[in-house]
Image: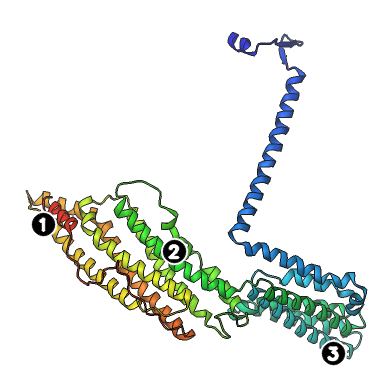
């Protein structure tokens, strides 16, 4: 206690109260210091959060500058459409419904051209259809008499709103016309209900449709003419990048396992590319849906088979699932003896190399939309590597069971232990063979796409000299050393 008082280097003030107890009095300057310290910490924390926000915003803009351009495009569209309020002749032409044009731009303008066309057409068609039906219902209600008019209006709103809402549960309608069904319900209800108190219903419906058409047309023009972002281009790019990521992740997983045996290092980001392939289903389906609404552009003509890209993506996800299982097998807690790992390392890495070559060739061919002359050769080399791995797996159990038993019981226990230790390695080799078969399915889907869209003829391209072209590979010194080690077990 004395040391604590001496460390303060100051006086301690106490107040004695009735009953003999005392309480310590803190100087006023100490309280102010704590208050200012808390305020300073609060300001500093807020400053750090603001700085982190702007840092993330800068990173988002640098990763894809098209996002920044999209923001300017939306601002330009809203500025132009707001002229219908600022300029008196334009305002008189559309009446008091000019705000619907501004609302239309805010609601339907999307990042890609396909999404903007999808919303614009859905909104325009739904508004026109709902307006015509609302005018018809209003005319029928007027001829029904004053007492029956609200009944006719209410029943029509109930019936059409219920039918349109149910249609949104139908998969084909939900995929392509979900937004239109929602706008139909909104427009029909507003026009029908408001028409009960408004005399000039036809004029009101005409003005609203005109302003919506103006806003939609402006969005389409700006979206298509000013640095357009096509959903079809993005889908094409996503598919080709996923092929490259799948090839890199397969190559990275196998290389890390056989080259860095015994290390506890974290897997590199390149080896985890298969996760992006597994998580890309929603993005691919969304882009394919929007790409159907886009006009012909670049290499993508009218009625382009975007559905085939979804089939390619599905086969790649099947392959990515096998890569994920392969990664889990490599990270098994059961430690494989180095001699067994060394025995299969060359065959596994050879098959991995040929498999990744096929995927990279497919990615390059699909990106350029040109047939490849090397795909057949690469597939033959991959099948040859599969046969080599099959032969290595067949000889592995024989080598494991070979050691002379000192006694039957000890031999049985030793065989069980060896089989347990070699199981993750055999599973990984089997998964590599399954991945190769999945890659052949990807080749078939890409070939079907090439036939549907008529890829350009293949260029005369010499095969890579660094790739082995022979179909039989003799066992190298590493495999012989591994077999000798197994025989000594």
The crowding category of the residue bearing disc 1, from other C-alpha atoms within 10 Å (few below 14, some 14 to 19, many at least 20), is some
Residue 314 lies left or right of residue 227; in this view the side is: left
Quarter of image, res 441: bottom left
Dot 3: element: helix
Residue visible at 52% across and 73% down?
A: 236
Residue in front for this viewpoint, 187 or 457: 457
> 262 above or below 469?
above
Q: Which residue is mark 2?
A: 245
Please give the residue where the numbered disc 1 appears in the rendered image.
402
Query: Label 3 neighbourhood size at 10 Å, few (<14), some (14-19), many (20+)?
Result: some
**Eye-nearest disc, 3 or 1:** 1
Q: Nearer the viewer, residue 123 or 172?
A: 123
How many labels sit on residues? Answer: 3
Going from N to C along the chain, the mark reached first, 3 or 1, is 3
Q: Judge by depth and name the residue closer to the eye, 279 or 388.
A: 388
Q: Which residue is mark 3?
A: 140
Dot 1 falls on a residue whose secondary structure is loop
Q: CA distance from mark 3 to mark 1?
A: 94 Å
Residue 335, horizontal then vertical, whole percent:
27, 49
Looking at marks 2 and 1 on the same chain, the residue that comes earlier in the sequence is marked by 2
Would you identify the image quadrant in which residue 131 lies?
Answer: bottom right
Label 2 sits on a secondary structure element that is helix
């Amino acid at each position: 206690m004395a040391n604590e008082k001496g460390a303060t280097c100051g006086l301690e003030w106490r107040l004695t109260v009735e009953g003999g107890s005392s309480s310590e009095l803190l100087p006023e300057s100490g309280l102010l210091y704590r208050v200012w310290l808390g305020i300073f910490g609060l300001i500093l924390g807020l400053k750090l959060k603001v700085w982190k926000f702007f840092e993330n915003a800068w990173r988002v803009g640098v990763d894809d500058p098209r996002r920044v351009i999209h923001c300017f495009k939306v601002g330009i569209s809203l500025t132009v459409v707001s002229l219908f309020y600022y300029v008196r002749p334009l305002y008189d032409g559309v009446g008091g419904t000019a705000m619907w044009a501004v609302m239309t731009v805010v609601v339907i303008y999307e990042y890609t051209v396909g999404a903007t066309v999808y919303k614009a057409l859905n909104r325009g068609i739904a508004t026109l259809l709902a307006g015509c039906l609302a005018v018809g219902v209003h005319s029928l209600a007027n001829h029904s008499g004053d007492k029956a008019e609200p009944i006719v209006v209410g029943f029509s709103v109930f019936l059409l709103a219920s039918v349109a809402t149910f249609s949104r549960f139908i998969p084909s309608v939900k995929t392509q016309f979900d937004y239109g069904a929602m706008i139909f319900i909104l427009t029909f209800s507003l026009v029908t209900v408001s028409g009960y108190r408004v005399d000039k219903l036809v004029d009101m419906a005409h003005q609203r449709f005109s302003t919506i058409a103006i806003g939609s047309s402006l969005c389409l023009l700006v979206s298509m003419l000013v640095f357009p972002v096509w959903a079809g281009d993005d889908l094409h790019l996503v598919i080709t990048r996923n092929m490259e990521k799948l090839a890199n992740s397969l190559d990275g997983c196998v290389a890390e396992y056989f080259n860095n045996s015994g290390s506890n290092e974290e897997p590199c980001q390149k080896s985890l590319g298969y996760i992006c392939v597994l998580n890309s289903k929603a993005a691919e389906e969304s882009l394919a849906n929007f790409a159907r609404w886009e006009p012909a552009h670049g290499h993508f003509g009218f009625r382009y088979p975007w559905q085939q890209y979804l089939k390619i993506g599905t086969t790649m996800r099947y392959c990515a699932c096998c890569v994920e299982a392969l990664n889990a097998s490599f990270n098994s807690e059961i430690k494989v003896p180095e001699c067994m790992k060394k025995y299969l390392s060359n065959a596994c890495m050879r098959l991995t190399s040929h498999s990744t070559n096929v995927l990279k060739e497919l990615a390059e061919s699909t990106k350029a939309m040109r047939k490849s002359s090397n795909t057949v050769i690469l597939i033959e080399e991959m099948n040859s590597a599969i046969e080599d791995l099959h032969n290595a797996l067949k000889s592995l159990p024989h080598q494991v069971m070979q050691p002379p038993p000192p006694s039957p019981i000890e031999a049985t226990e030793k065989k069980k232990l060896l089989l347990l230790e070699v199981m993750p390695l055999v599973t990984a080799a089997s998964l590599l063979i399954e991945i190769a078969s999945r890659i052949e399915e990807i080749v078939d889907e890409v070939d079907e796409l090439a036939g549907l869209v008529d890829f350009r003829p293949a260029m005369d391209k010499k095969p890579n000299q660094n790739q082995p072209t022979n179909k039989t590979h003799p066992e190298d010194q590493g495999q012989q050393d591994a077999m000798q080690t197994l025989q000594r077990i």
